[in-house]
Amino acid sequence: MKFIPKKKNVLLFIFIITGHFLFAQIDKNATKETRHLYRNLKTIAKKHILFGHQHALEYGHGWSNETNRSDVKSVTGSHPAVVGIDFSDFSRHSKEEIENAKAILRKNVINTYERGGITTVSWHFLNPVSEESFYWKDSVSVAAMELIKPGGSHHERYKEILKTIADFANSVKGKNGTLAPMIFRPYHEFDGDWFWWGKKYTSREDFIAVWQFTVSYLRDTLGVHNFIYAFSPDNKFNSESEYLERYPGDDYVDMLGMDDYADFGRDGKYDLKAGVKKLKIISDLAISKNKLAAFTETGLESIPNPNWWTEILLKSLKSENLQLAYVLVWRNDVKSPTHFYAPFPEQISAPDFVKFYDDPYSFFENDLKNIYNKKIKL
């Protein structure tokens, strides 16, 4: 055995003895179920990928608020493995409205957990300073990140909003009393200019300060121990260094993600080589850091390509030995005839989506067995 000086990190000792590092989950007090989920997602990513859909159980194409329904289930017989929700209603509303929003999401999260599915949370955060939209153009153009960081004029207001999130996180308990784990993905697409937290309006230092405070306050002060934290820019990067330009550090991130619509067919344009290259960057980084990686958002609006699922998405995901825990497509609007990203019965891509579902590489909710309770063997 090679001698290791005491001052060296114990993880180096583990590496020499076992040949691999422990997974670098940032919350050392994470619940057992959250730790199991983290580990099992890492295992699944080596040979498979989970399929996710935003707002899958809240509403879909032409319907809303129907028990145990999703457009994905209507086509395949299974809900998506990963269900997206949003914390957008947790600020700039009355206490009663916030509590109503919590109740709806709480039921969604608990039901998904009880079925064995996974919840991921985006946060279209209404500007806490202007009290307007999450979009820059609709938020009275207030660059709020420098104002909500520690020492900023609206920092106490930000802490109150985080308390609302913590209260919710600590309330989503299953029948056995355990908390449902969630993948929390704040400040997504920060390298774009459409959100008020975008790169154009926020310095690197302020972005990192707010991110680090958010994680520390939720985890260490408010006692949230059922979150997996996902870092998720848009597709504006072309190298590892560009991807990491606003990375807040390994102690503040569990999952490396990317949102990318542009390379996968938006506006009829495909650049799959570029898209796969970016997925390879985050996959390789996650492997090197012993983190998780995921394709946190993508999709083709209206899915006019009848073979998009197998010829575009599946082929891309299977290439380059990618290790991605999940891929999530965006929502299906209730009223819009064109704003949908997952098929519904009779939609032109539905037969190809069934082929995507049937492929052994993709996992849906029906494929998940005890993901929170034991080590998965594939």
Image (tube, grey):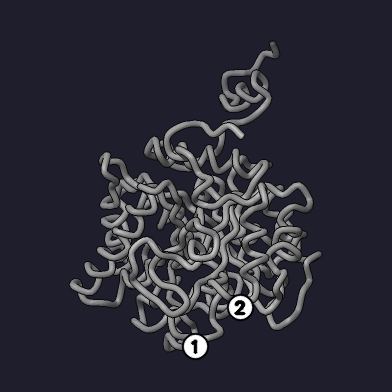
Q: Which residue is mark 2?
A: 301
Specify which label sits upstream in the sequence, 2 or 1. Answer: 1
Marks 2 and 1 sit apart, C-alpha to C-alpha, by 23 Å
Q: Which residue is mark 1?
A: 137
Residue 95 makes an appearance in the image: yes
Q: Residue at x 50, y 41 (%)?
A: 38
Q: Residue at x 68, y 70 (%)?
A: 236
Q: Quadrant of the C terminus?
A: top right
The three-letter code of the residue at mark 1 reads: Lys
* Residue found at the far top of this picture: 1
The three-letter code of the residue at mark 2 reads: Glu
Q: For residue 66, which quarter of the picture? A: bottom left
Please determine whether, in this image, residue 201 is positioned above or below residue 329.
below
Question: Mark 1 falls on what kind of element?
Answer: helix
Please determine whether, in this image, residue 171 is positioned above or below residue 129.
above
Mark 1 surroundings: few (<14), some (14-19) or many (≥20) residues within 10 A: some
Percent across and percent down for residue 353 are 63, 64
* Residue found at the far right of this picture: 273
Q: Say which mark, if any, is on residue 86.
A: none
Residue 206 makes an appearance in the image: no
Percent across and percent down for residue 132 are 37, 84
- Left or right side of 59 for 156: left
Question: Mark 2 falls on what kind of element?
Answer: loop
